[in-house]
Image (spheres, grey):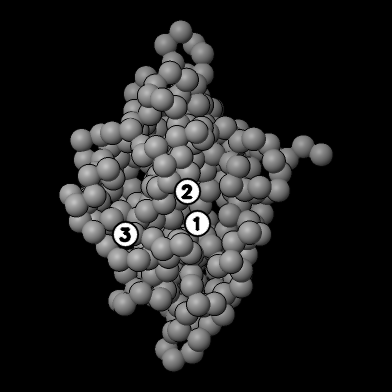
Amino acid sequence: MAVERIVLDNEKARLELVPALGGGIARLDVRIPGGSFLPALRPWTGREGDAFSLGSNVLVPFSNRISGGGFEQDGIFYLIPVNLPGEPLPIHGDGFQRRWRTVARRGEIAELECDGEIGPFRYRARQIVTLAIDKLVIDLTVQNLSGQKLPFGVGFHPWFPRNAGTRLRFRASEIWLEDERHLPAGRRKVIEVPDWDFDSGRVLPEGWINNVFGGWDRKAVITQGGGAVSLRIFASDNLDYALVYSPNSNVDFFCFEPVSHPVDAHNLDGRPGLQVLEHREELTASMTLQWDV
């Protein structure tokens, strides 16, 4: 049985959404001079049970991992169940695992919605996806329906093509190191880690990178070699962190994830980037992918 796809297109770009797989993006292709299309995001492999084989995911009601089985809020410890096979810690909330409803479709705009529940979080999330001639804009909102105040976070998890010509450029002030569990293991100034300084633009590391960058200016540039479309990324003011992930130079993808908080923020001093929402209060963020071809 074919998976439902929502297609938005215009004379310059074509987008496919998959509501059943977390409301994620199956593919985003842009027309280049001459009339052919090239991918701006890694095209979906078609694996129906694997949301992380898509071209992009939304992260809600938190991003990345939470340690210790959960977190404490107002003197109460809340358990968070493990939610992904092969992962010993809960990761990326559960919005990417939910079936989203198509609420509205008008021209090059689609609005999707889902109701989620993981640990103490009860919420309603909404995406407004707008495809223009030169850009894709995703506005993401989450509303707390838990009946109590809780710390929420959001983020975007796009998967970009990686080839020999791929270069990444963005400015940041600090990098969060990770331990063997992919949890925070201290911070360094970016200038102290030159192999991970992307300020002037550079190729991705040959080996593993899975690190959060803080103090970035919420914009980045991806320059592609042949076979993919170069992009500029813009994030809303509350997405103060960006995570760069790539296993090694032998894979055909990498991730640049604008998110509201660092890994395991629920258990870090000060809970950086998380927003405590009262019942029915909302948190909104957005990501823009822009091209010029």
Amino acid under label 1? Leu
Amino acid under label 2? His
Q: Position of residue 64 (x, y in %)?
A: 47, 60
- Rounded to the nearest angstrom, the CA distance separating label 1 from label 2 is 7 Å
Residue identified by numbered label 2 = 157
Total count of labels: 3
Q: Would you say 263 lies left or right of 17 here?
A: left
Q: Position of residue 127 (x, y in %)?
A: 51, 51
Earlier in the chain: of badge 3 and badge 2, it is 2
Residue identified by numbered label 3 = 176
Q: Secondary structure at mark 1?
A: strand
| Residue occupying the far bottom of the picture | 75
As drawn, 111 above or below 147: above
The image quadrant where one finds the N terminus is top right
Residue identified by numbered label 1 = 59
As drawn, 168 above or below 94: above
- Rounded to the nearest angstrom, the CA distance separating label 1 from label 3 is 20 Å
Q: Residue at x 19, y 52 (%)?
A: 192
| Residue occupying the far left of the picture | 191
As drawn, 289 above or below 72: above
Q: Residues within 10 Å of mark 3 (few under 14, many from 20)?
A: many
Judge depth for marks 1 and 3 and give the one in front. 3
Which of the pair 155/252 is nearer the observer?
252
Which of the pair 238/268 is nearer the observer?
268
Picture quadrant of residue 212: bottom left
Q: Would you say 288 lies left or right of 26 here?
A: left
